[in-house]
Image (spheres, rainbow, N blue to C red):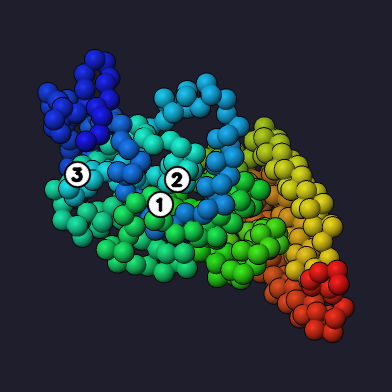
Amino acid sequence: MSRPHTRGGTHAYSNGAEANQLHTARAIGAVTMMAQDTINIVAVADLAPTQMTVGMREVSFKRRRWRERSSRQAADYLNKLRIPVVLGPNARQYLIDRHHLVLALREEGIVEFTVSVVANLRLLSFDDFWASLERQHWAHPFDDEGRRHCYKDMPETIDSMQDDPFRSLAGTLKRAGGYAKDKAPYSEFRWADFLRCRIPRELVEHDFAGALAMAMYLAQGAEAAALPGWFLASSTERFLRIAATQTVSEDSSMSDPKFEVPAELRNMAERTIEQAEKAFDMFFEAANKSMAPFTHPGAEISRKVLSVTEQNMKSAFDSARRIAQATDLQEAMQIQSDFLRSQMTSAGEQMKQIADRTMSTAKDVTEGKFKTGGSG
């Protein structure tokens, strides 16, 4: 039985029941949402996941970040940490977020967490429970190849989740600035599925830097425009959205209103673009340095992808800067439309260049122009 957590001198649980009816609930569809979150301390081994996979590189990254904390910082962090869970059948507590963090801290020796019970679904049947989770975007029953599974296939414990290398690639791509953090449910998994269809898994597993370069190239293309946090969208949509709320120019006719963009808004957008451009410059500089010592065939392809990506990012920043300098909403939208059209036109040629380089490299390997192993 999990230990009760005291708050204001009152136990959140007493003999398995809510004490003194402290926590009332209201029904929303099939989900009973807690009017006031119940706080409890739960052993990690007792927590059940609501997704089938994690990116183990992401877990390792979080472990490294955890080790950078001092003992006091670690204690303060754990004291403030609240892991969101829902109560399911048999009163099992299910994680609905922070899977990577929980697994990372478990591997660092943390054996229990303070959880926040945000919904009570324990009276539902097994299938209704999982269906309710999905309606709330609290479950992701997809495996490491992006295939949907039956609810009965969901892992029982945190340790039994699969490693999805594309989820790691998507997380690293976000930190490298390939796309912006977004509140859309499972945004990283959506990026993982996008990359999964376009990058060989073998490249991700054996040449992660090369896969990241290719992911960066793909991320700023028009094919990624529908994904949450897409770069051009993140740097211009906010500008366009704010601009659309501005007053109509007095000298414009009602039949053809002209939405003027204030100079201060344009200046703010330009500063944001400049900061993002500096971050990308740092990424490309570090990536080029990391690949410089390598002469294996995969590095040649990675360098080509990185070069094409850098060119595309410069075009994207130029377009974003032109949008920021637009004096009215119509001009800004036209610039964005022109950029997307040009990206679609150039994407085919660029992919042909990369494919040609890949074939040329394969031919060189066959003819022995590259040394692929030992010095011998």
Whether 71 is drawn above or below 273: the answer is above
Q: Amino acid at mark 3?
A: Ala
Q: Are marks 1 and 2 in contact (CB under 8 Å)?
A: yes
Q: Residues within 10 Å of mark 1 (few under 14, many from 20)?
A: some
Q: Position of residue 309 (x, y in %)?
A: 74, 60
Say left or right for 294 vs 347: right
Whether 120 is drawn above or below 195: the answer is above
Q: Given this view, does label 3 or label 1 mark the residue nearer the observer?
A: 1
Q: Which residue is mark 2?
A: 103
Q: Which residue is mark 3?
A: 91
Q: Amino acid at mark 1?
A: Asp
The residue closer to the viewer here, 22 or 297, is: 297
Q: Quadrant of residue 210?
A: bottom right
Q: Secondary structure at mark 2?
A: helix
Extreme-top residue of the structure: 9
The residue closer to the viewer here, 370 or 180, is: 370
